[in-house]
Image (cartoon, helix red, strand yellow):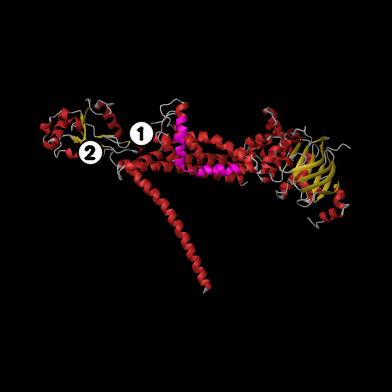
Amino acid sequence: MNSIISTRFLNLYYNEFHALKGITMDIQPNTVAALIGPSGCGKSTFLRLFNRMNDLIDGVKITGDVLVNGKDIYADVLDVVELRRTVGMVFQKPNPFPKSIFENVAYGMRVNGITDNQYIAEKVEESLRQAALWDEVKDKLKKSAFEISGGQQQRLCIARALAIEPKILLMDEPASALDPISSAKIEELIWELKKDYTIMIVTHNLQQAGRVSDTTAFFYLGELVEYGDTKEIFTQPKDKKTQNYITGRFG
Amino acid sequence: MRKFLRNLTEKIVEGILFLSSTVTTLTVLLIIVFLFREGAGVFSQSPVEKGFVIAVNKDNPIQTLTSAQLKLIYDQEVTNWSKLGGKNDSIILFRLDDIGNYYTEDELGENFKNMPEKLSELMDKNSGMVAFFSDKYLAKNFRGRVLKMSNTTLKEFFTGKEWFPTAQPSAQMGVLSLILGTLWVSLGAILIALPFGLATAIYLAEIADSRTRNILKPLVELLAGIPSVVYGFFGLIIIVPAIQKIFDLPVGETALAGSIILGIMALPTIITISEDALRTTPRAMKEASLALGANRWQTISKVVIPYAMSGITAAAILGIGRAVGETMAVLMVTGNAAVIPHTFLEPVRTIPATIAAELGEAPQGDLHYKALFGLGCILFLITLAINITVEYISGKRNKTSND
């Protein structure tokens, strides 16, 4: 059992509020894990544990272990910058920087001290190809990232995350702000990226979870109700709550 | 009946609102029209004081002189007519006081009753003479020629370096030194205020916890509420002597003192507006930067500041706008010498300070009075340009953030 991500009896509190309750979960390398559940169930909070994005919020307290590549990422000695290079993130809304398309992708390399322009240029192209965006933007790399469509912007954000060669990609509802066609492109992309990355994706779209993921975790009120093979979860869930949710009885 | 009353009330309220907005607009327009109508008078009035004339020998080919040329003549910097396009003849200056050099008191008669005749004779005799005297001494059959003075032109007004609106024989209406003084002091102010203001704004928006911000922000805003005369007083008592001591100057009233005071006064504008701009940076954008392994300072300098750049620019320009129009504090600390500044350690005079200082002694309708209105027009145009720039920049900003 060589899971790339695992949590052990993980609890998270926002001041007094108990947001995640004793979660134990393992994710295998090169798989896609979907996190589903009604709004406010803690799935986004859970996702943001793995690159320590919750650090930015005041009053967050964590107990239990979070291991990435077998290392406790909440240990005092851990370098957060190093962690975030290994664990990339794509956000709900496309959020490119107010820079050119090229500079958006190069940003991660530049802030991590890479100055070799030749390498950066190659890496930018490679990342844009990986994100299936290269052909659409190769003639306007110098243009502002705000000038391309929302779907393209989101793929740009994916390319941006890929450029620093992470091992894990966290995606927080990456297609929820996009039209169906752009959304389909992103799904296709996730399927492709699975070869090289381990992906965790939060989604409200159950069909999407069913299409792209290998495993699915159902969260409810801060608890991990059920976690297992996606096919099993969708066809024969063990828990009543999971069944109710995926059949649309609540959520 | 009730419906009728309700409609009537609505109509009345509507009418009042319409009326007040019309009145406001008209007032603004009227002020601008008044300003420009008075200001334009500079260009349609002779620079020689009313009741005085400039006369030359009737054979002198010079037809008109500009105010600046006349000043050169009277400062004896030009001593030959050929320099002004006339014939080769040395210029003989004549002021009324000089009459004793040419005629005795007896010749002039009682109460100078022979003065017009003698002046006429004098102008006839000396081919190179130029004279400045009261028109009551102008003889009916004057044998010299009264020189036409050309009005101040737009070019002279803007590029003239001399501002002596009450000079005799001819007023000098060059506002270049005042415009440059204003811009110089404002530029200095923004150079001082921008680094401090931006640093404070970044601290408030990105670093300070909410308790610190709740104390600091009202304090900064309080700065905007202090009357400018108090700033001027502070500058006069503290900053002016300090500058005098530090730089070992004869006087401490310098452009630098004005810049420092204006810089302090522009701080609240710069801090408030750029802090607002910095705070509009979407949280997701900052998180994206951090998620890529950037540290806090990299995120601020590479993402937050570029995102807020148009807001920061608007803040800086509005800060300049505040500095350009400021009157009282500048008047008190800059020394008010109408010379073109070369360093920050020289006295300068700004446009608003000039208007405030001189309007009281300029007779209404006089050329000086009109020149001050002309200055007001320039000030208005500068601030208008500033406002248009800010509109343009924030318009551009709205366009990008709508994506």
Residue in front for this viewpoint, A188 or B255: B255
Residue B208 location in percent, x, y?
64, 40
Q: Chain of mark 1?
A: B
Kindly report the secondary structure that dominates the magenta region of the rendered protein: helix
Identify the element where label 2 is drawn. strand
Picture disc at residue B52:
2
Residue A102 in view (yes/no): no
Which quadrant does the C terminus of chain A fall into? bottom right
Work out whether mark 2 precedes mark 1 in sequence or the reverse, and give the earlier one: 2
- Crowding at dot 1, Cα within 10 Å, few <14 / some 14-19 / many 20+, comes out as some
Q: Residue at x 44, y 59 (%)?
A: B19
Q: Which residues are magenta?
A: B215-242
Q: Residue at x 26, y 39 (%)?
A: B49
Picture disc at residue B160:
1
- Look at label 1 and name its amino acid: Gly
The residues bearing labels 2 and 1 have C-alpha atoms spaced at a distance of 23 Å
> From what the image shows, is residue B365 above or below residue B344?
below
